[in-house]
Amino acid sequence: MSQPFCFGIVGAGQLGRMLAQAGAALNARFTFLDPSDDPCGRAHGHHLKADWQDGAALAQLVSASDAITFEFENVPSDAVTTLAASRPTYPPAKALDTARDRWSEKSLFMRLGIEVPPLALVDNQADLDAGVATIGLPAVLKTRTLGYDGKGQKVLREMADVAGTFADWATCR
């Protein structure tokens, strides 16, 4: 039997788990870097419990891997850049930079002619008020980064949801 291909995965959540489950049939092995105590991907490979940017842990991931990926967009892109200096890493850090910032991602789509729903850049309450005036309600206020599966989002259904909401929302995101 041939030597197994070893993948490094930054993150060990649901997508990492599914990748490892699918790869097991191909004789692939997995090492996960994740700061969580007991991430769900852990059952399907070796778990390096460390911060995303821990230099020693990144070096361990490199030495255990033939190629590296990440399983969600909240991984710091500089960690991916560090890994890519030593191993093939896909997608590249530039793709991560774009995907982890909703405004950058939607701006790229618009430049490429890909349709997106109406949107507005919101950095303060005045921007929010102007965005709602242009787009209308209902609307969804989203963080630019670190949001997923509904985290970092607030549904605005009526004007009472909009008034003064930026300061409250900004402190809890």
Image (spheres, rainbow, N blue to C red):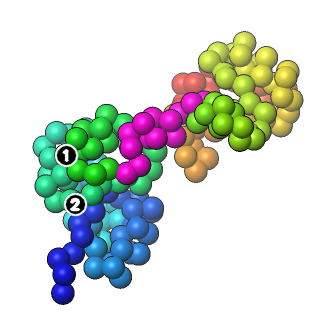
Q: Position of residue 83 (x, y in %)?
A: 24, 44
**Distance between mark 2 and mark 1 Cα atoms:** 10 Å
Under mark 2, the amino acid is Asp
Q: Position of residue 154 (x, y in %)?
A: 68, 37
- In-image side of 95 versus 30 (left or right): right
Query: Can residue 143 be spotted in the picture?
Result: no
Q: Does residue 98 belong to the magenta stretch?
A: yes
Give the extent of the magenta segment: 90-104
On-image quarter of the N terminus: bottom left
- In-image side of 156 versus 106 (left or right): right
Q: Which mark is residue 86?
A: 1
- State the SS at label 1: loop
Q: Which mark is residue 147?
A: none
> Which of the marked residues, 2 or 1, is nearer the chain's N terminus?
2
Q: Is residue 134 above or below residue 16?
A: above
Q: Is residue 94 above or below residue 130?
A: below
Q: Main secondary structure of the magenta part?
A: helix
Residue at 57%, 30% in the rendered image: 104
Q: Residue furthest top?
A: 126
Q: Residue furthest front?
A: 112
Q: Position of residue 118 (x, y in %)?
A: 78, 33
- Indicate the quadrant where residue 56 lies: top left
From the viewer's side, name the closer residue of 123 and 154: 123
Q: Which residue is mark 2?
A: 66
Q: Position of residue 99 (x, y in %)?
A: 52, 40
Residue at 21%, 75% in the rendered image: 4
- Indicate the quadrant where residue 119 lies: top right
Under mark 1, the amino acid is Ser
- State the SS at label 2: loop
Residue at 86%, 29% in the rendered image: 136
Residue at 61%, 47% in the rendered image: 150
Q: Is residue 156 above or below residue 151?
A: above
